[in-house]
Amino acid sequence: MTDRLPHEKGFHVSWDQLHRDARALAWRLQSDAPEDGYKAVVAITRGGMAPAMIVARELDIRTVDTISVKSYNHQTQSAPQVIKSPDMDIIGDGTGILVVDDLVDTGKTLEAVRALMPKAQIATVYAKPMGRPQVNTFVTEVSQDTWIFFPWDMALQYVEPYRGKD
């Protein structure tokens, strides 16, 4: 058996699929919301911005902020580094705050986020097994060795068929 390149065991997500999955995430989150609703959504940039916007719309959350955590250089993961924090006067310890990201992989990014907001509710659209313990709510689990291709990473182009040229 040959080793596969990341794109050979890929899970391709279209904009439509991301939208449906983010709405499904919001549907799950509404039952876990504090009685008076979430105070704010914090999107983990960059991948969490699109699902956070959809979740905020669906749950009628008007305060949206971001946290920037750099943990990837293209497809190589490194130690997470917080390069931009949300307004901590609003966020506090995370009580009543919903943190949204596109994916939890190893969980290292979310460990850095939890250190700043230990009481926040953390939700991702997709989850891999190693990172699942860091997430309170997610929609779809994929295997650890699957590479997820998000719509902002792709362009439409012709693909040769597996067999034949006709």
Image (cartoon, rainbow, N blue to C red):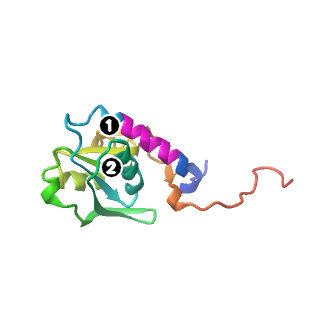
Three-letter residue code for mark 1 = Leu
Asked whether residue 24 is drawn in magenta, I would say yes
* C-alpha span from label 2 to label 1: 11 Å
Instruction: Tell me where residue 160 appears, x and y as whole percent.
Output: 75, 57
**How many other residues sit within 10 Å of disc 2, few (<14), some (14-19) or many (≥20)?**
many
Q: Residue 20 carries which label?
A: none
In percent of the image, x 20 and y 34: which residue is there? 35
Q: Quadrant of residue 23?
A: top left
Left or right, residue 137 beside residue 165: left
Magenta: predominant secondary structure element? helix
| Residue 89 percent coordinates (x, y) | 12, 58
154 relative to 79 in the view: left or right: right
List the residue tagged with mark 1.
29
In the image, taking residue 147 as reference, residue 47 lies left or right, namely left
**Which of the 4 image quadrants contains residue 128?**
top left
Query: Outermost residue, top direction?
Result: 31
State which region is magenta: 17-27
Q: What residue type is labelled 2?
A: Val
Is 50 contained in the magenta span?
Answer: no
Residue 5 makes an appearance in the image: no
Q: Where is residue 82 in the image (x, y as percent from the top left)?
A: 25, 64
**Which type of secondary structure does the marked residue at label 2 adopt?**
strand
Q: In the image, is residue 86 above or below residue 98? A: below
Residue at the (49%, 47%) spot, across then down: 18
Given residues 133 and 90, the one toward you in this image is 90
Q: Residue at x 43, y 37 (%)?
A: 24
Where in the figure is residue 108, as x and y percent of width and height? 29, 54
Q: Which is nearer the N-term, disc 2 or disc 1?
A: 1
Disc 2, disc 1: CB below 8 Å? no
**Residue 100: assigned label:** 2
